[in-house]
Amino acid sequence: YPANKIAEYVCDGIGGGGGHAKKAGGLIVKKKMREKYGTDDIFNVVNRLLCKYMEKMIHVYVMSAFSKDTQGGNKAGVVLNRENLTVCQKMGIARELGYSETAFVTKSDRADYKIEYYTPTDEVPLCGHATIATFSLLYHLNMLKKETYTIETKAGLLRMKIGEDGLIFMEQNKPEYL
């Protein structure tokens, strides 16, 4: 939205109807803005509201694992550092993307990263291509500074190795026979 439209929206929302506030020379709006936000500077209020809105935005990356020269591969969504998302929100994001899995990466007390994997309908313990996609993203964002990392998943702790050329290797746990 252009700033003037946002300012008009704020005025309408605070003034109980833009027409009344505008007819009163903005005094009603200024008074209500001071009461609600501690200031009557419309641009300060708009900036605060925009910052609040931006905090709620969720950045979703789409990466292709197992691709060569940007061709083919297996796509996965990756969401970084959004600890506050609910299970329903994670499944909703996965459903919106439409890929088989979406990885949600957060901090871990047990490993370098915690990764949760969601399909549009459920959480799964591990997803190889979404893990490779996640580390490819971290590599391209210059967030990887060492050669070996550990990840916490529902399938256990796993080790990841990053080659100098950015090639990513994922160790698997030994299979458990049931």
Image (tube, rainbow, N blue to C red):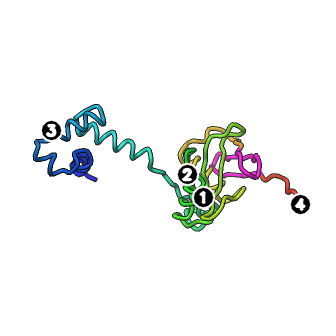
> What type of secondary structure mainly makes up the magenta span?
strand
State how far apart marks 3 and 2 are (Cα): 44 Å
The amino acid at mark 1 is Thr
Part of the protein shown in magenta: 151-171
The outermost residue toward the right is 177
Mark sitting earlier along the chain (1/2) = 2
Marks 1 and 3, Cα distance to the nearest angstrom?
A: 50 Å
Would you call the spot at circle 1 few (<14 residues within 10 Å), some (14-19), or many (20 or more)? many
Question: How many C-alpha atoms fall within 10 Å of the one at disc 2: few (<14), some, or many (≥20)?
Answer: many
Q: Earlier in the sequence, mark 3 or mark 2?
A: 3
x and y percentages locating residue 155 in the rendered image: 76, 52
What is the C-alpha distance between the residues marked 2 and 4?
33 Å
Total tally of numbered discs in the picture? 4
The percent position of residue 2, horizontal first and vertical second, equals: 25, 51
Which residue type carries mark 3? Leu
Q: Which residue is mark 3?
A: 27
Per the rendering, the mark at residue 79 is 2
Q: Residue at x 10, y 47 (%)?
A: 23
The amino acid pointed to by label 4 is Leu
Tell me the kind of residue under disc 2.
Val
| Few, some or many residues within 10 Å of mark 3 (<14, 14–19, 20+) | some
- State which tag comes first along the sequence, 2 or 4: 2
Cα distance between the residues tagged 3 and 4:
73 Å
Q: Which residue is mark 1?
A: 102
What residue did someone put label 4 on?
178
**Going from the N terminus, do you reach mark 1 or mark 3 first?**
3
Gap between marks 1 and 4 measured at Cα: 27 Å
